[in-house]
Amino acid sequence: MKQLHHLAAAAALAVAGLAGFAANAANAATVVVDVSGAQSINLPDEAGNTVWLIDVGAGTMLNSLNWAVTLNALAPSSLSDMQVSFGSASGPAFTFAPDALDGFSDSGSYAGSLDLTGLGIAAGADGKLRIEFSEGFKDFGLNVAEGQWLSGSLSFDVTPVPEPAGLGLALAGLALVGAAARRARRH
């Protein structure tokens, strides 16, 4: 009877840890970033670009990106030069242009999506997602805006990384279940 009680306690511990993982998976969310007012000024990683740090949680994984934006490229710059980069504040970034085809100045609206799973794009240990608006080609002098993000949004589907305590709880519970089962077989 005592072994059965230990087995039940160990199983409860394992179930609690695994429930934490399931709850974390259910916490998948969408982070929406309003791009209105952002400017594309210089090349990526140069001073002067619009850069936003969005708190999404330490290690949060980016699964997909959806965008619906309206851009305005100032002549002689083109709409295809306007780009956005995102990733951790301290690591490499993923860069894309919402419109890679319109090689002219003026306004345009664009929508689309990207599957980011398998690319390993995540917020850093500080929980910040860094978003930078830049130019793929510099037409004007340094620090002169070449494009304006007039309206729209970037929507990131994200999954938080499980907390280490939940993993430890699940592993400890499973180990105890195994030990209790071995003891029960011996007796």
Image: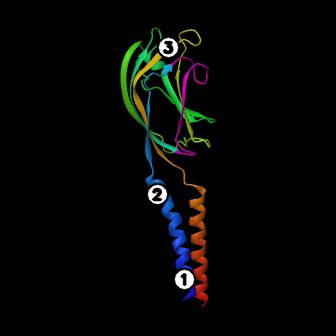
Q: Secondary structure at mark 1?
A: helix
CA–CA distance between discs 3 and 1? 70 Å
Report the front residue among 121 and 104. 121
Q: Say which of marks 3 and 2 sits in front.
A: 2
In the image, which residues are magenta?
40-60
Drawn side of residue 76 relative to residue 125, left or right = left
What's under tag 3, amino acid-wise?
A: Glu
Quadrant of the image for the C terminus? bottom right
What's under tag 2, amino acid-wise?
A: Ala
Circle 2 packing at 10 Å, graded few (<14), some (14-19), many (20+), is few
Q: Quadrant of residue 120?
A: top right
In the displayed structure, would residue 25 be above or below residue 47?
Answer: below
Among the two numbered marks 3 and 2 on one chain, the one whose residue lies closer to the N terminus: 2
Report the residue that reaches farthest toward the right: 90
Q: Secondary structure at mark 3?
A: loop
Q: Check if mark 3's residue and mark 1's residue have beta carbons within 8 Å.
A: no
What percent of the width, then of the height, locates residue 124?
60, 41
Circle 1 packing at 10 Å, graded few (<14), some (14-19), many (20+), is few
Q: Give the labeled residue for mark 2.
A: 23
What's under tag 1, amino acid-wise?
A: His
Q: Check if mark 3's residue and mark 2's residue have beta carbons within 8 Å.
A: no
What percent of the width, then of the height, locates residue 171?
59, 66
Q: Quadrant of residue 167?
A: bottom right
Circle 3 packing at 10 Å, graded few (<14), some (14-19), many (20+), is many
Please check the rendered image and state whether residue 51 is part of the magenta-colored stretch, yes or no. Answer: yes
Q: Give the labeled residue for mark 1.
A: 5
Quadrant of the image for the N terminus? bottom right
Q: Which mark is residue 146?
A: 3
Assign the magenta stretch its main secondary structure. loop
CA–CA distance between discs 3 and 2? 45 Å
What percent of the width, then of the height, locates residue 149?
44, 21
